[in-house]
Image (cartoon, grey):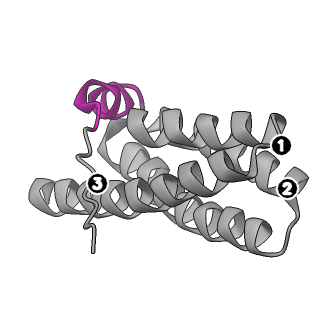
Amino acid sequence: MLKQKEVVRLNPDRLEELYAQLGEAGAEDVVCRALEELAVRLSHTERCHREGRLADMRKSARSLVAIADQIGMQALARVAGDVAISADNNDVVAIAATLSRLLRIGDSSLSEVWEMQDLSI
């Protein structure tokens, strides 16, 4: 069995910008809301794919790009964009592959940010 592990890199500069702009409480609020929304959207994107609703899946993946970018999750944003492009091209093999990668990176990214927040408290 092939075990796939994604290396996740967050852009700490983006998080620092948020903290500088919004203060600690404001930035933590934005990050927490973004993490919650990312978890919901990842699940929604996967469900849309499973149900064959590709237009909705594409829309959900595009929204992931914006949210992930906001809090410095560049890899997640890039792969969510790849899912949307695969949907635009109606490439079912690419959709399945990029969506699987998106879900792996999403899991790793969410865990990474939660760990970073725990360290800052």
Distance between the Cα atoms at labels 3 and 1? 32 Å
Q: Quadrant of residue 121?
A: bottom left
The amino acid pointed to by label 3 is Val
The amino acid pointed to by label 2 is Leu
Residue at horizontal 39%, vertical 54%?
Answer: 105
Distance between the Cα atoms at labels 2 and 3? 29 Å
Residue at horizontal 50%, vertical 53%?
Answer: 102
Which residue is more in the foreground, 121 or 42? 42
The amino acid pointed to by label 1 is Asn
Residue at horizontal 25%, vertical 67%?
Answer: 3
Q: Quadrant of residue 66?
A: top right
Q: Label 3, on which residue?
A: 113
Q: Label 2, on which residue?
A: 54
Residue 86 drawn at (x, y percent): 71, 39
Label 2's element?
Answer: helix
Q: Which residues are magenta?
A: 10-21
Q: Earlier in the sequence, mark 2 or mark 1?
A: 2
Q: Is residue 58 above or below residue 16?
A: below
Our reading of the magenta stretch's main secondary structure is helix
Residue 52 drawn at (x, y percent): 86, 68
Closer to the observer: label 2 or label 3?
2
